[in-house]
Amino acid sequence: MATWKESIELEKMDPDFLSIRSIFISDSISNMYQLVKHSPTKISKLLGLNYDAYHTKLVNPEKFSVLHINVLAYAIQIDPEIIHNIIQKETEHKVLEKIKKYKQNY
């Protein structure tokens, strides 16, 4: 697990972010689009995205940058690997499709 040099005390965390943290920690989220129901304006603002760009990334989670993943993970005080693993599972079919297409051409 990644360790943050500085941390946010859970008691001082924004209640909306605490709720999002709980969703990740409890394994209640299977795809990033589920976040659309949880303070999308706050998350998009945190990530420096307008709502449309954030929504596009939720639909195509491979478009989230490492920085976006790390910022969200820090804000909700979780290991970024939790978010990355969700994205990886969700996009595995796209990865395999690209590999298959590559192999067909070579």
Image: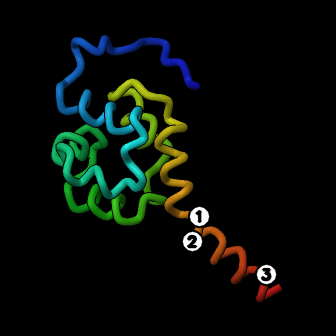
- Label 1 to label 3: alpha-carbon separation: 17 Å
- Is 97 situated above or below 82? below
Nearer-N-terminus badge (1/3): 1
> Looking at the image, which residue is at 29% across and 15% down?
10
Type of residue at label 1?
Answer: Glu
Given the image, on which type of amino acid does mark 3 rest? Lys
Q: Which residue is mark 2?
A: 94
At numbered mark 3, what does the secondary structure look like: helix, strand or loop? helix
Say which quadrant the N terminus sits in. top right
In the rendered structure, which disc, 2 or 3, sits on the residue that comes first in sequence?
2
Residue farthest to the right, as pictured: 106
Side of 22 relative to 92 (left or right):
left
Q: Viewer-proximal residue, 70 or 59?
A: 59
**Residue on which disc 1 sits:** 92
Dividing the picture into quadrants, the one containing residue 13 is top left
Q: Position of residue 102 (x, y in %)?
A: 73, 80
- Report, in whole angstroms, how far the alpha carbon at label 2 lies from the one at label 1: 5 Å
Q: Secondary structure at mark 2?
A: helix
Task: Name the residue at 19% across, 24% down.
Answer: 14
